[in-house]
Every structure is written in structure tokens, then in C-alpha cells.
Image (tube, helix red, strand yellow):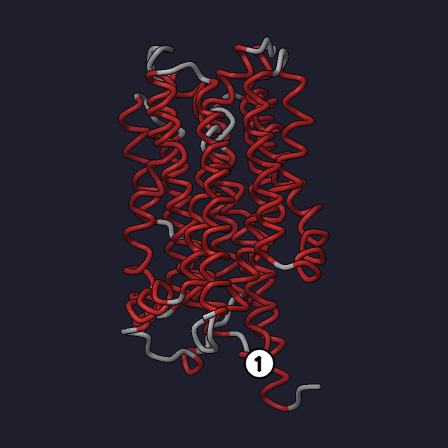
Amino acid sequence: MAFGPFKRLDWQADRNLYVLWFAQFVAMIGMSACIPFLPLFVIELGVAKSDAPLWSGLITAAPFVFSSLLTPLWGALGDRYGQKLMVVRAILGLGIAMTLMGLSTNVWMLLSLRIFQGAASGFVASNNAFISAQTPAVRVGFALATLQTSISAGNILGPLVGGTISDALGFRSVFWFVGAMCLISMFIVMRYVHEDKGLSSPRSSRVGKNITMAFNNKHIRTLLITLFIAQSAIVLTTPIFPYYLEQLGAPKELLSTLTGMIVSIVGVCVIISAPWWGRRSDRVGYTNTVKIAAAVVSIGMLLQVFVPSFYYLFPLRIIIGLSVGAILPLSYAELARRAPDGRKGGIMGLASSATLLGNLTGPLICAAIATNLPLEYTFVASALLMALVIAFTKYSEAKNVTAISV
């Protein structure tokens, strides 16, 4: 039981956590709501259908370019001026970007606004930094893990919301809906989140030290690379799904909705399966669990090449999602376990950067392949990347065993 100022601190930290969970949930909905129809929206903006896969991949990846580059800058400004200000700035930037996207008149304007979205956002990193600084040390792990669930929940609901609204009211309505939700979320953060700047400590040199420590530690280095490769594989095929569904005979009037369902299935299954994989990992170990799950995902990705109808994609995506539930959540949990005390927040920030780079790399690979080869080859590339996760994990395990023997 906490007494005196500690009791108040726990109560305030809980309220901050719940408010930021909701704000991040809204932000994740916003960032993923446009995924189902972006490939169709670029055609509406005048892009030829033959060039649409290239533009779809570029526009999907665009936010992650500047987001990856500017996240350390926003973190430094947060340390100087306050993390709450960075949270408000991030969600305001996302809301402005999304609203203006609804007014796009050509594909270059849409691409520019997606770049602006990535440059102005950095919402997840800002939230992680705020919670790490404002939560009692004994509860930071729980708080960060709880905050991560808002990402999965938002990524599940976002494509469903976006696909449904776009089919019912048009593509542009989704951008305006998300902009309005971000505005509401921003005011809730401003009103109910309290930052005690006395709890924050100077971190002018932490970023560089965290990076050095992470890449000198073979376990943390392996986990960060695993997150990057796995995330690249998972999102690689997303930009071409509307075209692939149409190629497999899906009704044109429901392409956005069906794409939203296909994308969301993976997130739903991750939430369902992650606890079971976690218990299995406790019994047999992280590396063994990840190797099995990655093998199933790799096979599932490859089988999507051979389906005779879009209906067969649904069971395959369920199998893929149930297996992905072992890779990303357990990698985050293993990172939190391996990170030294006092650096857990910083290491989790590096994990976010690795995931962002995966979100950037996957669509770019997709665009390069879809521009020059049939769409089916994107699934082959995704399967090969997931197989690389297996190979890399086995190699790392072998090195570890050798080191222990020596």
C-alpha cells in the first residue's frame, strides 16, 4: 500500500496512463484507418492503375522516413520543455495532417502531407518517454506494456473504421473523421494529463549511450534486428492488398472494407494468441518459440500466392496472426527483461524506432517488387524475410551457446 505523496503519485500516474492510452488508441486508429483505401485513393487522384502499386508503396512508407529521423529530436525537446508538450504537439500534428489529406487534389500533395505527418508526429515515442519519466520505477514495466496494447487495439480498429467509412461516405470522409478525433483527444490530454517536471531527469546523453549499449549487447542487438525484419515482413504486402483482392475476384464496391478486414485479422489474432505464446516461451524459451512462430508465418505468407479465391485469404491471415502473436509481443517483453535498470525506457524507444524502420522498409520493398513483377512476388518476399528471422535467431542462439561453452 502506498502512503502520502506516493499514494497520490500512483493515482496521478494511473490517470496519466489511462488518458494517454486513449489518446494513443485514437492516434493509432488515425494512422491505420487510411490503409485499406490508400491504394484506391491514389487512383482517384489521377494515378494510372499501372503506376498505382509504386505510389501506394511510397505513400504508405512516407511518414516513417521523417518519423525515424526526427524521433530523437522530439525526445530531446521533450527533455528540455516537457514531455506533455511533445504529446500535445504530436497529436495536433497528426490531426492537421489528416484533415489536410482530405483536401488533397493530386498525389504529390498527398505524398507531401504524409511526409509532414511523419515529421510532426512521433506520438508513440512521446508517450513512452512521458510514461517512463512520470511513472514510479516499480511500475514502469507494467505501464509501458499497458500502453503497447493501445497500439494493437488501434491498429485493429483503424482499418475497419477506415474501410467502412470510405465505402459508405467516400475516401475523404475518413481523413476528416480522424482529424476530428485527434482534436478531441488533444483536448483530453491537455485537460487531464498532469506532468510533474520534478520527476524528470536530464537525458542529454542518454540516446547515444542507449544506442551504444544496445549494439554492444548481442541479446538486445538481436532483438532489435528481429523486430525490424519481422515488422518489414508483416507490413510488406499491405499496399497491394486491394489490387490482389480485386485480382482474386473480390467485389469492387467492397474492396476497402475487405482490405480492412484482412489487415485487422492479424491484429485481433495477436491479442488472442500472445498470452498463450508467452506461457509457452516461459516453458521452452524465447528463441525456440520465435523460430516456430516465424516458420508458420513464413509458410502462411507463401501460401497466399496459391489461393484460388480471396475467401481463402481469411483462414491464412488468421493462422499468420496467431503466429505473429509470438514474435512482436515476446520480442518487446524480452527486450524489457534484458534492458538494464534505468535504461528500459530508452531501449523501448529504440524498439519503437526499429518497428518504424520496418514500417518504412516493408512498403518500399513492396513498391519496388510490384512495379516490376506480378503481385504474388510480394508474398514471396515477405515469406523470405520471415525465414530470415528464423535464420538470424538460430545464428544468434548458436553464438550464444558457443560463448557459454567457451
The amino acid on which the numbered mark 1 sits, given as a three-letter code, is Leu
Q: Residue furthest front?
A: 406
SS class of the residue under badge 1?
helix
Q: Is residue 219 above or below residue 66?
A: below
The C terminus appears in which quarter of the rendering?
bottom left
Q: Which residue is mark 1?
A: 9
Q: Position of residue 341 (x, y in %)?
A: 48, 77
Image point (30%, 43%), residue name: 65
**Residue 268 figure quarter:** top right
Figure disc tally? 1
Image point (63%, 22%), residue name: 313
Q: Is residue 88 above or below residue 355?
A: below
Q: Is residue 171 above or below residue 296?
A: above
Q: Position of residue 333 (x, y in %)?
A: 57, 61
The N terminus appears in which quarter of the rendering?
bottom right
**Residue 97 figure quarter:** top left
Is 281 left, or right, of 92 in this rendering? right
Q: Position of residue 95 (x, y in %)?
A: 42, 44
Q: Is residue 187 above or below residue 372?
A: below
Image point (58%, 31%), residue name: 299
Query: 372 or 356: which is nearer to us?
Result: 372
**Residue 141 figure quarter:** bottom right
Q: Position of residue 240 (x, y in %)?
A: 46, 22
Image point (62%, 37%), residue name: 296
Is 271 left, or right, of 197 in this rendering? right
For label 1, the crowd category at 10 Å Cα-Cα, with few meaning under 14, some 14 to 19 and many 20 or more, is some
Query: 305 or 353: which is nearer to us?
Result: 305
Query: 375 or 121: which is nearer to us?
Result: 375
Query: 362 or 290: which is nearer to us?
Result: 290
